[in-house]
């Protein structure tokens, strides 16, 4: 295996091991020795990639946010109206959170438990993204008459954020069928288009 590829693989293994430790024990209780053991790599290999636990914690957060940004980009390009596009975004997001420990750990990091981590304000970013989508829908005549893009964006943001938080205690909230059923009940127009993306479970 080429050295560069081996180094990339080692770095990803350390990030994943750190994320698993953060989920199981919390950031303060997760030590660098424990993380290197989980990764089956030496402390020297760990410190080659990350000078401190803060650096490793930031790497977990950055990788999680990169995954979220990819999903946000897909939403921005989606041809469907906002309710359907955001439903598909929610299915994709919750599926990644459920199956990818790095995304799950990265989105749970908070300044009070991981010094140096800034709160990303994802809720506000998603609201603004949904508002932009709904406003474009209204301009294109895709929203029913009388629908207010701002109120639509508020409802959609509340749904996504609510499901994300509820699933931290009970991961059945992240099930694709559950998400689709909630959308069908609250936003029947979104149910006319079959969900895209992979199933959460």
Image: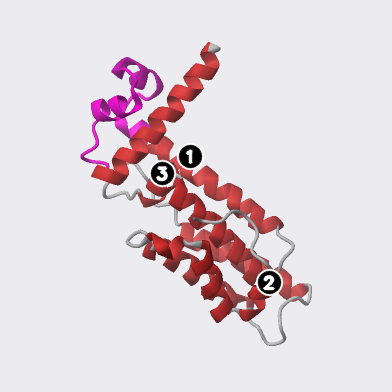
For residue 184, side relative to residue 14 (left or right): right
Q: Residues within 10 Å of mark 1 (few under 14, many from 20)?
A: some
Residue 135 numbered tag: 2
Location of residue 86 (image quadrant): bottom right
Q: In this view of the protein, can residue 114 be seen by the observer?
A: no
From the viewer's side, name the closer residue of 68 and 101. Answer: 101
Residue 80 can be seen in this image = yes
Which residue appears at 55% of the width and 12% of the height? 2
**Looking at the picture, how far across and down is residue 71, in whole percent?**
59, 52
Q: Which residues are magenta?
A: 27-56
Q: Quadrant of residue 35?
A: top left
**Residue drawn at the location 42% of the way across and 42% of the way down:** 102
SS for dot 1:
helix
First-in-chain label (2 vs 1): 1
The Cα–Cα distance between marks 3 and 1, rounded to whole angstroms, is 11 Å
Q: Extreme right residue here?
A: 140
Earlier along the polypeptide chain: callout 3 or callout 1? 1
Residue holding disc 1: 63
Secondary structure mostly seen in magenta is helix
Q: Residue 101, labelled with which disc?
A: 3
Q: Is residue 172 magenta?
A: no
The single residue placed furthest to the left in the displayed view is 29
The answer to if 28 sits in the magenta stretch is yes
Name the residue: 34% across, 40% down: 20
Q: Quadrant of residue 133?
A: bottom right
Element carrying mark 2: helix
Where in the figure is residue 96, as x and y percent of width and height? 50, 50
Eye-nearest disc, 2 or 1: 1
Give the camera-side residue of 105 and 117: 105
């Amino acid at each position: 295996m080429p050295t560069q590829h081996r180094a990339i693989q080692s770095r990803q293994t350390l990030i994943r091991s750190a994320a698993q430790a953060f989920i199981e024990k919390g950031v303060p209780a997760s030590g660098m020795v424990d993380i290197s053991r989980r990764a089956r790599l030496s402390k020297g290999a760990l410190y080659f990639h990350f000078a401190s636990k803060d650096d490793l914690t930031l790497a977990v957060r950055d990788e999680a946010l990169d995954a979220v940004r990819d999903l946000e980009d897909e939403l921005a390009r989606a041809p469907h109206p906002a309710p359907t596009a955001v439903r598909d975004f929610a299915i994709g997001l919750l599926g990644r959170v459920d199956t990818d420990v790095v995304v799950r750990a990265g989105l749970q990091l908070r300044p009070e438990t991981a010094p140096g981590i800034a709160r990303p304000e994802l809720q506000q970013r998603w609201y603004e993204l949904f508002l932009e989508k709904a406003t474009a829908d209204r301009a294109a005549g895709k929203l029913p008459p009388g629908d207010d893009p701002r109120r639509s964006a508020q409802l959609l943001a509340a749904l996504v954020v609510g499901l994300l938080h509820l699933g931290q205690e009970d991961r059945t909230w992240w099930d694709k069928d559950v998400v689709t059923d909630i959308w069908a009940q609250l936003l029947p127009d979104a149910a006319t288009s079959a969900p895209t993306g992979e199933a959460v479970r």
